[in-house]
Image (cartoon, rainbow, N blue to C red):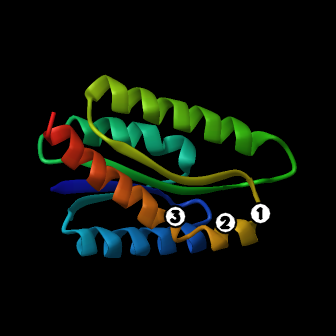
């Protein structure tokens, strides 16, 4: 099974630790991480997913990011739009895409406490690839 990971560079200290957890868990589950794409922020994740989802050598995609609350509701706008577009791509192309993006509304401390959620996203993609192959 070949999976790709798209990770936001925004909040780099958190997202790069998420990336490491995701890669380690993929290896543990026997999935090959064939592509890692770093994008500037969560808003850019769907474009990278779009490119990867068309590839025949990618069975599923994990998205990683941390959308931390600021002084405005910008975090909500970013998260809602990114999540919606990611879901649309998954359904359109029939390939699993896991939402491993934490937030919105979280503090930096909450985001740090959720780094391990990256493992859940990998597990979701691996399970879905297996289950879809049985249909």
- Count of numbered badges drawn on the protein: 3
Select label 1 or label 3 by which is in front: 3
Disc 3, SS: helix
Quadrant showing the N terminus: bottom left
Number of other residues with Cα within 10 Å of mark 1, as a class: few under 14, some 14 to 19, many 20 or more: some
Select label 2 or label 3 by which is in front: 3
**In this orientation, does residue 59 appear?**
no
Residue occupied by mark 1: 107
User: Mark 1 vs mark 3: which is more N-terminal?
Assistant: 1
Asked if 44 appears above or below 19 in the picture, the reply is above
Residue occupied by mark 2: 111
Tell me where residue 11 sits by quadrant. Answer: bottom right
Residue 54 in percent (x, y) is at 21, 34
Disc 1, SS: loop
Quadrant showing the C terminus: top left
Q: Which one is nearer the viewer's eye here, 118 or 134?
A: 134
Number of other residues with Cα within 10 Å of mark 2, as a class: few under 14, some 14 to 19, many 20 or more: many
User: Mark 2 vs mark 3: which is more N-terminal?
Assistant: 2
The CA span between labels 2 and 3 is: 10 Å
Tell me where residue 26 sits by quadrant. Answer: bottom left
Disc 2, SS: helix
Residue occupied by mark 3: 117
| Residue found 48% across the figure and 30% down from its top | 85
Residue 86 in percent (x, y) is at 45, 36
Residue lying furthest right in this view? 71
Number of other residues with Cα within 10 Å of mark 3, as a class: few under 14, some 14 to 19, many 20 or more: some
| Residue found 33% across the figure and 35% down from its top | 50
């Amino acid at each position: 099974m070949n999976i790709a990971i798209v990770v936001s560079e925004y909040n780099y200290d958190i997202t790069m630790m998420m990336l490491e957890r995701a890669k380690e868990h993929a290896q543990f589950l026997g999935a090959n991480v064939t592509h890692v794409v770093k994008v500037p922020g969560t808003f850019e994740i769907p474009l990278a997913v779009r490119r990867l989802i068309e590839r025949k050598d990618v069975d599923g995609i994990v998205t990683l990011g941390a959308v931390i609350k600021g002084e405005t509701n910008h975090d909500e706008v970013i998260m809602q739009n990114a999540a919606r577009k990611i879901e649309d791509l998954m359904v359109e192309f029939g390939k699993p895409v896991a939402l491993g993006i934490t937030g919105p509304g979280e503090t930096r401390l909450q985001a740090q406490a959720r780094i391990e959620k990256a493992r859940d996203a990998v597990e979701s993609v691996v399970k879905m690839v297996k289950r879809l192959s049985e249909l």
